[in-house]
Amino acid sequence: MFEQTFVDGTQKTKKPFTILLSLGMQIGVIGILILIPLIYTQTLPNAQLKSMLLAPPPPPPPPPPPPPEKVVKVVKPVIKQFVANQLMAPRVIPKTINRIEESAPPPDTGVVGGVEGGAVGGVIGGVIGGVPPPPPPPKPKAPVGPQRIGGQVAEANLIRRIQPVYPPLAKSARVQGTVEFTATISKDGNIENLQLIRGHPLLVNAAKEAVLQWKYRPTMLNGSPVEVITDIIVNFTLSQ
């Protein structure tokens, strides 16, 4: 009977299948223990989680600066001696008494060039009867020599205009254009000192003969007629 209860130490009691099954069960138990905290996070302590996630509170602000000291101004009372134009007696006897001295008026010696007995509002070197009126302004001087004016101004004063005769030679040669002169208009309105500036030679003589017969209204300056210099342009066209 005793031989059946004891096991021989040399007999193999573990099989490979049993070892693998035991190892698998241990690994499964360890995996379950690791996954339980990851799945059920509500079971974690809230106080420890909040302390790990929240930042520490900021430091307290510095205390405010002390208020500035108030400067007390001492106002000395002003003692008024006159109230409603009446002299009042002081309530306290002053230590010093101010003396008021009036200076004597200057002697009446008069002024140099004055009138005996004087005159109100008089000045040194004045004249009897007041100040004389200022002299009248000088008249503007008349300009010396003829004055230049624009061609449009001179044309507005033109009284008589003689049209030039178109030269037959220039007409047959189909020549047209303008002839420009510079001239002096006398005080009577006549053409003087007529000078050619530019123009076609076939048209110059006809234009000159016509312009010398023109008559202008005298140009007035400060109420007096004056000589003026202006430019004169004569046009020649084949259609005229």
Image: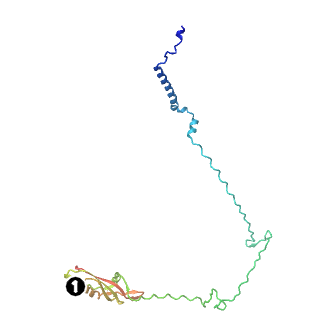
Q: Quadrant of residue 107?
A: bottom right
Q: Quadrant of residue 147?
A: bottom left
- Quarter occupied by the C terminus: bottom left
Quick check: 197 above or below 53?
A: below
Under circle 1, the secondary element is: loop
The residue most toward the right is 93
Front-most of residues 213 and 143 = 143
Horizontal placement of 111 versus 19: left or right?
right
Name which residue lies at 20% across and 84% down. 169
Q: Position of residue 144 (x, y in %)?
A: 41, 89
Determine which residue is flagged by label 1.
Answer: 167
Q: Position of residue 116 (x, y in %)?
A: 66, 92
- Quarter occupied by the N terminus: top right
Q: Amino acid at mark 1?
A: Pro
Front-most of residues 30 and 107 = 30
Quick check: 34 above or below 159?
A: above
Q: Position of residue 234 (x, y in %)?
A: 28, 82
Q: Quadrant of residue 66?
A: bottom right
Front-most of residues 91 and 4 = 4
Horizontal placement of 32 versus 96: left or right?
left
The residue most toward the front is 10
